[in-house]
Image (cartoon, rainbow, N blue to C red):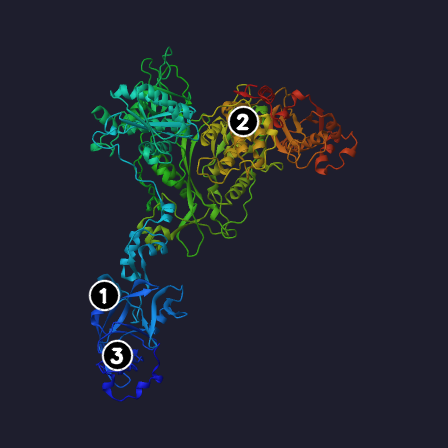
């Protein structure tokens, strides 16, 4: 390793010439010195402390490893590469100064464990006066390398992993690098890398990242050889390749091998795919969910490679789908006068049944490789294209998803007539086949509402048109496929007028033409209403502020489409078709937000509705425009849109409601108390029963914008953001000191829909108005008010009024004139119920429209109806691991929200007018928060039952009651230990007023009953509470029922218990709340009476009845078609 300066024996030599190279037997002494430039600037230290023996006058290419030198030095200028100038002076021990004026890189070929390798040294200084080349060990050590001794063997290795860089040999106690003579100069690439890889502190960066291409391929995670070579070519990578051989890497083959590129052997001038019919590719898709309207779950396509012509067939099974090739072959060959040569499919087993047919017809079969979609890529891509179009058409038309089959066929029809880049000159498939451009004039939007000619046959006064929905074209009869909602069928006809494609003037002319009969001269009073699907961008409704009428804003002018005038002529008129008048309601849902409203086909109607709403709010002084205070809680607003229809389902008006986002309110800041009484539906039926008993038709009223008439709490400040559809002019902005409407707010003076306290404020206002008019609030139901008006009595529930005299009812509406109440006349529709007179002094109630909406919303319009809402299997205990519904779904499966929405709609219908499926709905509500697939299927079955019975009406007509008398009775029943999971019983009961059903329920008992008698006793007690509540209501309004009120029970032991005649030992554990009915029985207010099982009305609410028994029970509760029981 040489020696340090302090031990140098040659320091005492004063002869300067003794240090000169070329003196025989002399030594060169290199002392520690500091390089000083000629300009006096200091440079990095150059420590040279090795005494080198000179045995020859010639320069040597040997490299000495010196532990005292801080720089690499070379004596041969030809070895130095990438040379650049420098200004260093190195002082020797005897005072001699060596000038170092050049620095560069040197590539050495060294031996490492007997193998040759290249090593590049950077920052090597040229010292031509030295007889030996010097390699600084200190610099190598700082780079992480060190000497390794193994007996007499010495090597320089990397300390981190022991990798040997080169071997070292010792001669005369001096360490030499084992180089291969002569040392070769570096290649230009190595030199360039050496120059670029130097560090900024001029410290030598020895490039020891060396090795073969295969070596770095493995070290770098089996990167591609090309990538490794590109990395090595980058000077900053710090790696050098010694061998660029590319051996096969077995590990890469095992981990990376992919399929070869798809062969194009069947392309070329004379290839089969360049002939029409040469190659037909086919693919099958399915099963699709849900089934289409015809029960198909699979679709199969056949695509001609030459023309890209596509045929799509639908089938219920895979086997039938594949057999469609027989139909396609006959059609294609005869239609286009060609021969099919090859049928190419995947390896699906469903195509096996066409092999025999292909052999008999001479069609070759080609089967693509397994899991190699590219082999049959054209058919695969065609499926994607067709289904993308079909989905878009379904969503745009708002038709049920079950129409996907029609959409798929229509998509293929359109694609065959559309240009495609796959054909030369972007010709359409039909143009390639027929040499003529196809006629596109018969293509209309899928789901277009149209008028269809209807044959009057022998009825010359019948309507000549009906409304339909275009769902495709038919090649067989050259007509349109039209879905007729009224008849629930699809017809093919050429006699179609597509209202969507007509201009406004033509549309009005068509609607007038539909009103007039051509030959009889009679006219219909209704026009065919159609939904006009417009894709044009709609302008924003603007409400600008101005000075007119001292209001802060005025309404922008708007355009309204002229409505078709209805003419009336003498003669017999046919009852208007309901389906024609509610097409828009059925097939175009109400907008969910402002954006949808202004883009809808009813844009102008919704704009008018929004303008009317804003005018009403301004007229009522609901708000004041201010600059929004910083840090205030400003609520968002939302537009709610609703299509209002009358009792017959005909369009009445479009309603837009501006509501506040109450979910953003903060307690104590913009709301406090929120409680408001909620009306019970049984109270409404009590009022209608009284109207039928008194013979005075019930009338109802409406208070426009009722909630905004109530004054806001004075101690609260509620701010709203400026709503959509309202703009503020520049003058107002400047006056308020705001740059835009975002800096403004609406400060509420009155209540507004959507606020948490809005219901409470309106209830308080109405209560004050009714009390000032002389009405008294009922204790039993806070929503019912009554009044003695002379000899008459008036009863009011939510502005639905009746009384013993019609004049008294009229005076009620007059007393609320300050609220701008509108007298709507005899009630025809109330809270979603259609109310009609039965012609015999009674009422019939139904919810046909609500049921239709329910079925439409949940995609059950075309579901098969069932005769009973629930089957006997409802008593089976479902396994714990049964399929649970998820909160979200990506494959079309029902979600928890879907189930809750459907069950909520069913529950509302059951509570209002349909006791016949109350038991089934009760079963579905058991797992509302964690529903299972079984619960979803049960809810769908109930909906299917409603589909077949949606026209049923419940009749409210007094039966066999003496004048001015009131008879109140109840029927109760129990299903002992009905729930097998916890053995709790089920209570069912119904309350009748003068023979009319006014209340019913089916619910699970709170505790476990120990016997049938106890279950029946508990059921009778629970229904008695409802019975006594109605009695208290009737007593308040002066209609006290006859006593005793009858409680019909079909269990003798329970009757004795209710009458207090049985021993109390078997019932002493019952709660006092249950036994209270015994007190009423002893006082003669109520009396239990036995009823035979076949006459027990409550069986309808506790058991899964077969269709025959169900029909009998419906008759007993006066539920039937047209209200006839």
The residue tagged 2 is 806
Crowding at dot 2, Cα within 10 Å, few <14 / some 14-19 / many 20+, comes out as some
Dot 2: what SS? helix
Q: Within the image, what quadrant is residue 411 found in?
A: top left
Nearest to the observer: residue 465 or residue 620: 465
Camera sees residue 810: yes
Disc nearer the start of the sequence (3/1)? 3
Residue 76 quadrant: bottom left
In screen coordinates, is 111 left or right of 948?
A: left
| Residue located beneath label 1 in the image | 185
Element at label 1? loop
Q: Gap between marks 1 and 2, in whole Å?
A: 121 Å
Q: Which residue is depicted at the point 33% across and 86% down?
A: 9
Q: Residues within 10 Å of mark 1 (few under 14, many from 20)?
A: some
Does 1037 appear above or below 525? below
Is 1123 situated above or below 37? Answer: above
Instruction: Please give the name of the residue rendered at 41% of the width and 42% of the height, measured from the top-left corner.
Output: 619
Q: CA distance from mark 3 to mark 1?
A: 26 Å
């Amino acid at each position: 390793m040489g020696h340090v300066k302090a031990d140098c024996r040659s320091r005492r030599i004063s002869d300067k010439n003794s240090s000169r190279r070329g003196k025989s037997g002399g030594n060169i002494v290199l002392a520690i010195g500091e390089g000083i430039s000629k300009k006096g600037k200091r440079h990095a230290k150059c420590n040279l402390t090795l005494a080198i023996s000179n045995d020859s006058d010639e320069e040597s290419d040997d490299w000495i490893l010196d532990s005292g030198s801080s720089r690499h030095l070379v004596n041969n200028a030809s070895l130095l590469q990438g040379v650049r100038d420098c200004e260093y002076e190195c002082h020797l021990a005897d005072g001699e100064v060596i000038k170092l004026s050049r620095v560069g890189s040197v590539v050495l070929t060294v031996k490492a464990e007997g193998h040759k390798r290249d090593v590049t040294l950077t920052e090597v200084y040229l010292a031509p006066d030295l007889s030996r080349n010097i390699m600084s060990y200190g610099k190598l050590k700082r780079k992480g390398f060190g000497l390794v001794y193994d007996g007499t063997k010495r090597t320089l290795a990397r300390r981190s992993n022991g990798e040997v860089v080169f071997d070292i040999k010792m001669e005369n106690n001096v360490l030499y690098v084992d180089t291969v003579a002569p040392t070769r100069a570096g290649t230009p690439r190595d030199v360039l890398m050496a120059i670029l890889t130097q560090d900024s502190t001029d410290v030598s960066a020895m490039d020891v990242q060396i090795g073969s291409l295969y070596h770095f391929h493995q070290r770098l995670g089996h990167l591609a050889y090309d990538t490794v070579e590109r990395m090595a070519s980058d000077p900053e990578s710090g790696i050098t390749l010694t061998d660029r051989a590319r051996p096969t890497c077995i590990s890469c083959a095992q981990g990376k091998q992919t399929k070869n590129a798809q062969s194009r052997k069947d392309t070329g001038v004379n290839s089969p795919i360049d002939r029409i019919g040469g190659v037909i590719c086919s693919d099958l898709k399915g099963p699709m969910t849900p089934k289409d309207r015809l029960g198909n779950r699979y679709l199969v396509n056949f695509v001609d490679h030459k023309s890209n012509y596509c045929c799509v067939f639908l089938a219920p099974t895979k086997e039938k789908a594949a057999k469609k090739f027989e139909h396609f072959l006959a059609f294609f060959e005869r239609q286009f006068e060609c021969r099919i040569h090859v049928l190419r499919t995947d390896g699906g087993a469903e195509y096996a049944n066409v092999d025999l047919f292909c052999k008999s017809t001479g069609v070759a079969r080609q089967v693509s490789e397994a899991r190699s979609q590219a082999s049959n890529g054209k058919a695969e891509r065609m499926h994607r294209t067709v289904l993308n179009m079909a989905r878009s058409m379904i969503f745009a038309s708002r038709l049920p998803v079950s129409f996907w089959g029609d959409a798929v066929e229509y998509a293929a029809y359109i694609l065959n007539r559309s240009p495609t880049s796959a054909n030369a000159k972007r010709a359409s498939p039909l143009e390639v086949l027929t040499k003529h451009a196809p006629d596109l004039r018969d293509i209309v939007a899928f789901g277009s509402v149209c008028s269809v000619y209807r044959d009057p046959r022998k009825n010359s006064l019948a309507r000549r048109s009906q409304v339909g929905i275009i769902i495709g074209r038919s090649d067989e009869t050259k007509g349109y496929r039209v879905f007729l909602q009224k008849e629930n069928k699809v017809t093919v006809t050429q006699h179609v007028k597509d209202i969507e494609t007509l201009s406004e003037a033509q549309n009005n002319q068509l609607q007038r033409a539909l009103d007039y009969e051509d030959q009889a001269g009679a006219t219909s009073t209704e026009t065919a209403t159609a939904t006009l699907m417009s894709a044009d961008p709609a302008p924003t409704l603007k409400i600008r502020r101005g000075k007119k009428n001292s209001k802060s804003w005025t309404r922008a002018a708007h355009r309204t489409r002229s409505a078709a005038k209805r003419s009336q002529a003498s003669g017999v008129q046919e009852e208007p078709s309901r389906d024609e008048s509610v097409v828009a309601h059925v097939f175009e849902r109400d907008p969910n937000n402002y954006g949808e409203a202004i883009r809808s086909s009813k844009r102008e109607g919704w704009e008018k509705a929004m303008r009317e709403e804003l005018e009403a709010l301004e007229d009522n002084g609901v708000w004041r425009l201010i600059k929004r205070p910083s840090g205030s809680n400003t609520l968002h607003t939302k537009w709610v849109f609703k299509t209002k229809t009358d009792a017959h389902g005909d369009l009445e008006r479009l309603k837009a409601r501006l509501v506040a986002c109450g979910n953003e309110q903060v307690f104590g800041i913009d709301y406090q108390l929120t409680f408001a009484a909620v009306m019970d539906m049984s109270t409404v039926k009590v009022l209608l029963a009284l109207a039928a008993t008194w013979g005075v038709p019930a009338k109802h009223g409406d208070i426009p914008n009722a909630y905004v008439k109530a004054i806001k709490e004075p101690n609260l400040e509620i701010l709203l953001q400026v709503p959509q559809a309202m703009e503020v002019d520049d003058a107002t902005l400047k006056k308020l000191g705001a740059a835009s409407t975002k800096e403004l707010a609406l400060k509420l003076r009155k209540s507004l829909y959507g606020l948490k306290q809005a219901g409470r404020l309106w209830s308080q206002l109405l209560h004050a108005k009714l009390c000032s008019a002389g009405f008294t609030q009922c204790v039993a139901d806070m929503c019912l008010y009554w009044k003695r008006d002379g000899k008459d009595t008036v009863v009011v529930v939510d502005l639905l009024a009746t009384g013993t005299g019609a004049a008294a009812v009229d005076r009620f509406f007059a007393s609320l004139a300050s609220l701008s109440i509108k007298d709507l006349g005899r009630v025809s529709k109330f809270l979603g119920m259609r109310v009609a007179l039965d012609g015999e002094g009674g009422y019939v109630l139904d919810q046909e429209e609500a049921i239709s909406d329910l079925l439409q919303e949940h995609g059950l319009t075309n579901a098969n109806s069932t005769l009973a809402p629930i089957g006997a299997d409802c008593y089976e205990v479902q396994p714990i691991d049964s399929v649970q519904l998820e909160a979200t779904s990506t494959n079309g499966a029902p979600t928890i929200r879907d189930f809750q929405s459907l069950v909520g709609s069913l529950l509302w219908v059951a509570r209002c007018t349909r006791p016949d499926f109350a038991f089934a709905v009760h079963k579905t509500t058991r797992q509302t928060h964690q529903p299972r697939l079984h619960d979803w299927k049960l809810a769908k079955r109930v909906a299917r039952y409603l589909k077949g019975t949606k026209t049923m009406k419940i009749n409210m007509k007094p039966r066999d009651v003496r004048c001015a008398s009131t008879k109140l009775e109840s029927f109760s029943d129990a299903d002992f230990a009905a729930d097998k999971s916890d053995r709790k019983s089920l209570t069912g009961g119904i309350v009748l007023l003068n023979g009319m059903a006014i209340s019913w329920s089916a619910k699970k008992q709170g505790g476990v009953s120990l016997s049938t008698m106890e279950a029946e006793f508990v059921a009778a007690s629970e229904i008695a509470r409802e019975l006594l509540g109605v009695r208290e209501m009737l007593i308040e309004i002066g209609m006290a029922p006859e006593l005793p009120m009858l409680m019909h029970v079909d269990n003798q032991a329970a009757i004795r218990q209710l009458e207090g005649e049985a021993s109390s030992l078997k019932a002493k554990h019952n709660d006092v709340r249950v036994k209270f009915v015994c007190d009423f029985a002893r006082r003669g207010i109520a009396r239990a009476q036995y009823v035979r099982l076949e006459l027990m009305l409550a069986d309808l609410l506790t058991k899964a009845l077969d269709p025959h028994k169900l029909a009998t029970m419906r008759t007993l509760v006066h539920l039937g078609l047209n209200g006839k029981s």
